[in-house]
Amino acid sequence: MRETTVGIGAGAENFTGTGDSTDMVLNIGPQHPATHGVLRLRLVLDGERIVSAEPVIGYMHRGAEKLFEARDYRQIIMLANRHDWLSAFSNELGVVLGVERMLGMEVPERAVWIRTLLAELNRVLNHLMFLGSYPLELGGITPIFHAFTGREDLQHVLEEASGGRMHYMFNRVGGLKEDLPAGWLGRVRSAVAVVRSQLPVFEELVLGNEIFRARTAGVGILTRAQAEAYGVSGPIARASGLDLDLRRDEPYLAYGSEELRRVLTVVTREEGDCLARFECLLEQTVNALDLADACLDKLATLAPGPVNLRLPKVLKAPEGSTYAWTENPLGVNGYYLVSRGDKTPWRLKLRSASFNNIQALTELLPGALVADMVAILGSMFFVVGDIDK
């Protein structure tokens, strides 16, 4: 039996062999242009065909769940928005919703609608990154320039409101940090219109490209049964026919309102391949812009009012536990919060979307060609910090 090991990434190649088998173990990563960040894939190959695949994670692990337990309920918001740095606002949201539920707080209506608006703008920012970077991984550089042009327009308005470009820190237990700047809603509406006008580029330039379709159609098929078995969620699961969206199925914030129920569309596909995942992402971006416009319409009709509640100097959650989950851009994000009546959580367990989604690679990669590995990996739309926590 012969095993050949090839290390690609942070070091020289090394070959070891015993016996007479031709199977080869190929390490992609943990630092290599073919991977997102520091994810390592251990592939066993038979020629150009992948026999088995093992995602090796943990290179970015910093123990976020234990850090939560050493911070009070105001401070943990800072930790929450960092594990998925493309979904910072949505991450904050899950934590504050959990704490507010334990405290029995009812947040002012204006804050609820602003949170919903910002969550959808954050969703668009997240999706634009992948809409631009995925074609780049397959050799097309132009789409990422269009994606970042749209991202900048939205980043400007989010930075104006919160002061942050990536880590917004705009949520607070009981509402938001402060009210919106004067004239901000009009500037958001303009930014949303600009981004909407740019999306047809991805229809024509990417989905209309025969090379892109050849690299993605029928490649990396994830069945609905596999998605359910691995706890896959978000646009990846919906591309496999798993019709699940917490915004519709277990509404939070303003998603249960009549105004948003009419607008919210859960985009699904049945094919479960790389192309279907990209199509779901693009259509979901369009719907997020529609939801943002609906939130802007509602906010224009609301009278001025508070956006937060007055809190005690020392904030303690009553003894008990709760689980708050949200439909983050990449999938279901959940926080299991346990309190023993102190000002810090006794236990906080994080359920991140990317951690569950990436496990499906053990099913997707075997049988595929090495050349298709990058196409499959990129279509999983994950953030390594969200995997490693």
Image (tube, helix red, strand yellow):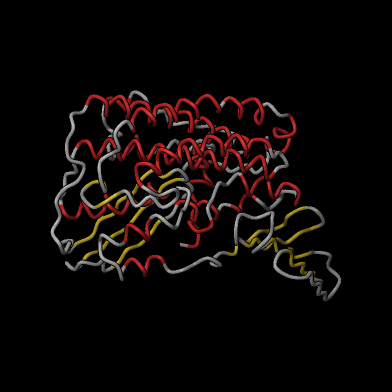
In this rendering, would 190 be left or right of 129? left
Residue drawn 30% across the image and 34% down it? 255
| Image location of residue 253, percent across then percent down | 27, 39
Instruction: Report the residue at 19% width, 43% height from top.
Output: 107
The residue closer to the viewer here, 327 or 73, is 73
Q: Is residue 277 visible?
A: no
Residue 78 percent location from the top left of the image: 35, 59
Quadrant for the N terminus, please.
bottom right
Q: Is residue 320 left or right of residue 271?
A: left
- Please tell me which residue is depicted at 79% across the width and 58% down the height of the picture: 46
Residue lying at the far right in this picture: please name it.
Answer: 20
Q: Report the number of numbered marks.
A: 0
Between 159 and 33, the one nearer to me in the picture: 159
Q: Nearer the viewer, residue 226 or 100?
A: 100
Q: Tell me what residue is drawn at x 65 percent, y 29 percent.
A: 207
In the rendered view, tell whether residue 339 sits above or below residue 231. below
Q: Position of residue 297 (x, y in %)?
A: 30, 24
Give the position of the C terminus as an image quadrant: bottom left
